C-alpha cells in the first residue's frame, strides 16, 4: 500500500533501484544531494526534495537537459539554521527554477529544529506554510505545479499536517531509527 518511497543516501538508493525494491511506488530523494552525484539521481526519481543552492539547481538542470527530461524538485531548507534570509534565498531560487526548462518546481521542503516538546515545531511549520503561500503567489505560470509542502517527520508529522504539509517523512516510525553512518 505504500505509494511513495524516499531515500536520503545515493548509494542506498542506487542499490535498491538495482534490486527493484520500489516496484510500483514513486521514489523521492530526500537527503542532501552533492553535485557530483546528480547524474545518479536525476531521471531516476520522481522528485528531488532537497534543492537548496543555485549550484545544485544548475547541475540538476544540466543533467536533465542531457537526458532530455524535466526533473521535479522541491526547494529545500535542510536545517533550521538556514532560516536567516530564507525568504529572499528561496524566492531567488524559485525564480531560477521557473526559468530552467528541464526543472519543474513543485514546492518546498523543510526539516525543522529539534522540538522542545509537543507542538514545539508548530510555529516553524506555520512559518514554512506562509513562506510556501508567499512564494506560490509570486509565480505566474507555475501555480498548478507548485503543490507540495514537504515537512514533518515521524515525531512531529501530525503538527506538520495541521500546519499544511502535503508530504511527510515517516521512515523512523516505519523502520525504526537508522544506525549511525560509519566514517572511515
Image (cartoon, rainbow, N blue to C red):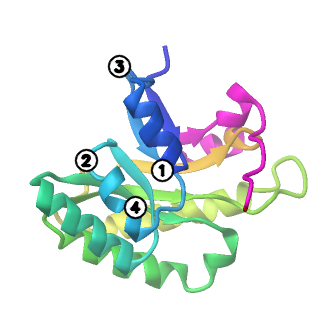
> Which one is nearer the viewer's eye here, 181 or 105?
181
Q: How far across and down, in percent of the image, does residue 97 sit?
A: 27, 70
Q: Residues within 10 Å of mark 3 (few under 14, many from 20)?
A: few
Label 2 sits on residue: 43
State the extent of the magenta-drawn residues as a range: 158-183
Q: Residue at x 42, y 41 (%)?
A: 14
Res. 156 mark: none
Nearer mark to the viewer, of 3 and 1: 1
Q: How far across and down, in percent of the image, does residue 170 sit?
A: 65, 35
SS for callout 3: loop
Label 1 sits on residue: 10
Is label 4 in contact with label 1 (beta carbons under 8 Å)? Answer: yes
Q: Residue at x 47, y 41 (%)?
A: 13
Q: Residues within 10 Å of mark 2 (few under 14, many from 20)?
A: some
> Which one is nearer the viewer's eye here, 153 or 128?
153
Residue 68 lies left or right of residue 71; in this view the side is left
- The Cα atoms of the two marked residues, 3 and 2, are separated by 16 Å
Confirm whether the magenta stretch covers residue 94.
Answer: no
Q: Residue furthest top?
A: 1
Nearer mark to the viewer, of 4 and 3: 4
Q: How far across and down, in percent of the image, does residue 146 sit?
A: 32, 54
Amino acid at each position: 500500500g505504500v505509494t511513495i518511497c524516499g531515500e536520503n543516501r545515493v548509494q542506498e538508493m542506487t542499490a535498491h533501484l538495482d534490486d527493484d525494491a520500489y516496484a510500483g511506488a514513486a521514489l523521492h530523494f530526500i537527503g542532501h544531494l552533492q553535485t557530483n552525484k546528480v547524474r545518479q539521481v536525476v531521471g531516476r526519481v520522481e522528485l528531488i526534495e532537497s534543492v537548496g543552492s543555485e549550484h545544485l539547481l544548475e547541475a540538476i538542470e544540466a543533467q536533465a537537459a542531457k537526458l532530455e527530461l524535466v526533473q521535479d524538485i522541491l526547494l529545500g531548507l535542510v536545517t533550521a539554521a538556514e532560516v536567516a534570509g530564507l525568504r529572499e534565498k528561496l524566492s531567488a531560487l524559485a525564480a531560477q527554477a521557473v526559468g530552467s526548462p528541464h526543472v519543474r518546481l513543485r514546492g518546498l521542503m523543510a526539516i525543522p529544529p529539534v522540538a522542545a516538546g509537543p507542538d514545539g515545531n508548530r510555529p516553524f511549520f506555520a512559518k514554512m506554510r506562509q513562506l510556501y503561500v508567499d512564494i506560490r503567489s509570486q509565480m505566474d505560470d507555475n501555480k498548478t505545479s507548485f503543490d507540495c509542502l514537504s515537512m514533518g517527520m515521524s515525531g512531529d508529522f501530525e503538527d506538520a499536517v495541521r500546519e499544511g504539509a502535503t508530504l511527510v517523512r515517516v521512515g523512523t516510525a516505519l523502520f525504526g531509527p537508522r544506525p549511525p553512518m560509519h566514517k572511515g
